[in-house]
Image: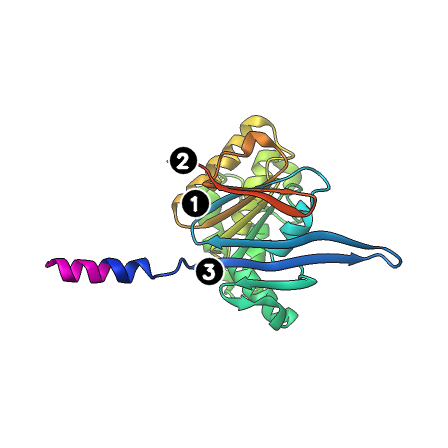
Amino acid sequence: MDKTKKHEIKKKSSNVKEEYILQLIDVKKIYDLGKVKVEALKQINLNIGKNEFIVIIGPSGSGKSTLVNLVGCLDRPTEGKILLKGKDINKLTDSQLAQLRGKTIGFVFQQFHLLNTFTALENVTLPMIFHDVNEKERIKKAKSILERLGLGERLNHKPNELSGGQQQRVAIARALANDPEIILADEPTGNLDSKSGDEVIKILKELHKEGRTIIFVTHDPRYMNIGTRIVKIMDGMIVEDSKNGENHA
């Protein structure tokens, strides 16, 4: 290949913009409490690329929970834009947003939020019902995910028959049910012992290696360096947004 062609290819590639899966642009969130208005988030700008592993960290009262709700498209901003896969969520109906969110984002919470009367298998099949997956396929897929997470012998166990770590793995399996591009994990190790917490981190790292975007939210500085990027929030503002230089292979 001659030098001219090499130069043209290099020039073309340098003009390609990074593709963001999620963007918060000049986002504010204000809660109207009658006589008092609380500005929970102030002018947030956050671009999240495909296959990033972002750790969002901040103390209690920092605005972290509000940011989680907006990043997860569970709430809409008072001002500014949130783009999920390039779509402005403020321009979507509640039904359209629910469909897009359900296919794009898988949620893992501190409290597990499993249905106590459902087995592990039934909990994992549930999200697929809302996306018209037939019963045979739902069961097949749920079994496959649970077996992958080491719960093949716990398919018919209910949450109260499982340890905390096992319940969180069921919750991760449920988050994977619709094959989302983003996993939003909000304090997923908060109710676990250190061994179970380490298992959850290992699973999230494996999912990241497979190409998923991981957004890990915590108040615990021990987990600050598990991802590829650190976003610190304080008093409703992002005070640091930096790449993690450690090797996460």
> Between marks 2 and 3, how big is the CA–CA gap?
34 Å
Which comes sooner in the sequence, label 1 or label 3? 3
Determine which residue is flagged by label 1.
208
Which quadrant would the C terminus be assigned to in this image? top left
Contact, mark 1 vs mark 2 (Cβ under 8 Å): yes
Q: Residues within 10 Å of mark 3 (few under 14, many from 20)?
A: few
Instruction: Give the secondary structure at mark 3.
Output: helix
Across and down, in percent, residue 85 comes to 49, 63
Mark 2 residue type? His
The vertical placement of 91 against 73, above or below, is below
From the viewer's side, name the closer residue of 178 and 228.
228
- The answer for how far apart the CA atoms under marks 1 and 2 are is 10 Å
Dot 2: what SS?
Answer: loop
Q: Which residues are magenta?
A: 1-9
- Disc 2 designates what residue? 248
Looking at the rendered structure, the secondary structure element under dot 1 is helix
Q: Is residue 40 magenta?
A: no
| Residue at x-position 54% and y-position 56% | 105
Q: Residue 24: x, y in percent? A: 57, 58
Of the numbered discs in the image, which one, if any, rests on residue 137?
3
